[in-house]
Image: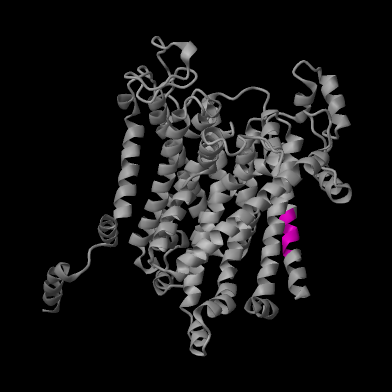
Amino acid sequence: MLNIILKRIGLAIPTLIAVSLLVFIVAHLAPSSPVDIIAGEKATLEEKARLAHEYGLDRPLYVQYGSYVWNIVAHGDFGRSFARGQQPVAEMIRNDFPVTAQLAIQAILFSLVIGLPIGIFAALYHNSWFDRLAMAGVVALVSVPSIVLGPVLVLFLAVHLRLLPVSGWDSPKYTILPTIALGARTAAIMARFMRSSLLDVLKQDYMRTAIAKGLSRSAAVCKHALKNASLPVLTVLGNSFGALLTGSFVVETIFQVPGIGYVSIDSITKRDYAVIQGMALLVAMIFTLVNLAVDVLYGVIDPRVRSQEARS
Amino acid sequence: MTAQTVTTDTQELPATLPASPAADAIRRLRRNPAAVISGGYIVVLLLVAIFAPLLARNGNTEGSAKSMNGLISHWNYDDSDTHYASLPAPPDSLHRLGTDNLGQDIATRLIYGARISLGVAVLVVLIEAVIGVTLGLFAGYGSGLRDLLLMRVTDVMFAFPDILLAVLVVAVLRSGNKALSPTVSIGGLVFALGVVAWPGLSRLVRGQALALRDKEYVDAARATGVRDHLIIWRHILPNLLSTIIVSITQDAAAVILAEATLSFLGLGVPPPFPSWGRMIMDALPFKETQPLLLIAPGILLALTVMAFNFFGDALRDAMDPRLRQ
């Protein structure tokens, strides 16, 4: 088992390096140098050269990349914000990332708590009115983007019914609408995958065997079907987490939640691209690590994956 | 004698042979109510986008189709009848859906928004198809080093969730000191979305090309001395067409969503061009007094994404009945 985990980590490292390289290259393809932004339009050439030297921007690109990565790995230093008075990007991440993480985790939990039971009951009562209603709801929700769902939720629950606050991030009450806006689509996807996965499992021979040996249907479902049906759902969970991270860009903007999405969008308008670079790298790294964790979990849950890996 | 028998046989065949695959697919599509409704919606929306200047009553009377090959017209609005103090204004006889905070007619902006939405989607999907199909074919048919390279590059691209890479590309394009002209901005948006859209399609094409490469008829072609690029063009690509068409139809929904999302975040279509995503953003401050400003583009966007999702699924079922569940 440990071997598999180490192998997976080994495979993820080149991806992480390539991701950091891609972010670095894209950020440095920018038509203007950060010096122009720091110094302003009136700066003389000497001033610009001095600033470039101060920030180490006059070094060759590969040296800059090397020191950028080294600073992140060795010191956790993501550089400094140009627009926010030299504030370290790492500090901004420390302040803002917990908010985004809380929002993403709440949204994941919301989607599991809502999506999985709906998917399970839709599969168990296949072709019933509940199944049809649930699947119609799923199709609708998958197509309603968060930029529509978020404002509509605000309109009805916050403005008209005055049940919840419109925006901000104070008490748990404030987190409800952003969580729903972010998690609704994932909940719909979970429900759909859980349903089709469970329907597949219910058709298997071992389910018939379990019932034939005298297990009640509910015991057979709980003991045998759910564990097997949860595997494909796990993969969706990994992918959905990435969508939730970028979805938080939108949801944090709508609800003015002070997370990394809100800060990133703000930094883009301020052309503060040390921050943009750091945040993009952070999100891509988290996404890669979450998928790594999902891969490893897959091996833990499914012995077939383990033996397949051991053989290859 | 033999030749004559064969001719007679072929003459009798059409009655018993099934229709061509394309005709067959269309027949199946027409039987599927979801496909008819979603396809009909898409056709109507396309017509609205194409004939926008005829449909829009207010503004854009002198709309010149000079940017992006006529896909997007410049936005000129006649505001002689506008009372700025009462903006955004509720619907009246002249403005069926009211006007926004700048006095622009909502209905007209929605109609022109269809142009942006569909225009960007078509262009992005074309870029995606060209890059994705070319790389996928060469990796899948060529295999070896090229294949390895493509797979690793797509691995890295897949490490960026959802629209993050597009956000990064747009951010970098805008980081110049000078403000970009709207047309360049839209070009940049199309570029950003196109550049990040292809990996999925290229993997799909690669997988199929890999399977087709070992088919007997490809071996036969190779044995008779047909060159590789001709085999790819004549024997592999035609067999992939249905896969490609289905894939890019489904991706069109994602592109429309991505454009709206980026525009909503202020990173997509710049004013004065109307984009549904931007309209939703602009409507947020007025959600209490004028909810229609928010709901109208929201409904249109959701319906359009839904239509492309439904039509893509229906197309998949119609073109490949084996996939039908």
Q: Is residue B223 left or right of residue A305?
A: left
Q: Nearer the viewer, residue B171 or A130?
A: A130
Q: Nearer the viewer, residue B28 or B211?
A: B28
- Residue B138 x %, y %: 52, 59
Q: Is residue A4 left or right of residue A156?
A: right
Residue at point 81%, 20% (across, down) = A45
Give the quadrant of residue A110: bottom right
- Residue A200 x %, y %: 48, 73
Give the quadrant of residue A259: top right
- Residue A12 x %, y %: 72, 61
Q: Quadrant of the C terminus of chain B?
A: bottom left
Please, what is the dominant secondary structure of the magenta stretch?
A: helix
- Residue A229 x %, y %: 55, 71
Report the residue that reaches farthest toward the bottom: A213
Q: Reply yes or no: does residue A44 show up in magenta.
A: no
Q: Magenta segment, which residues?
A: A11-16
- Residue A130 visible? The answer is yes
Residue at point 50%, 42% (across, down) = B257
Q: Is residue B227 left or right of residue A63?
A: left
B40 relative to A214, above or below: above
Q: Nearer the viewer, residue A45 or B120?
A: B120
- Residue B233 visible? The answer is no
Q: Nearer the viewer, residue A66 or A74?
A: A74
Q: Quadrant of the N terminus of chain B?
A: bottom left
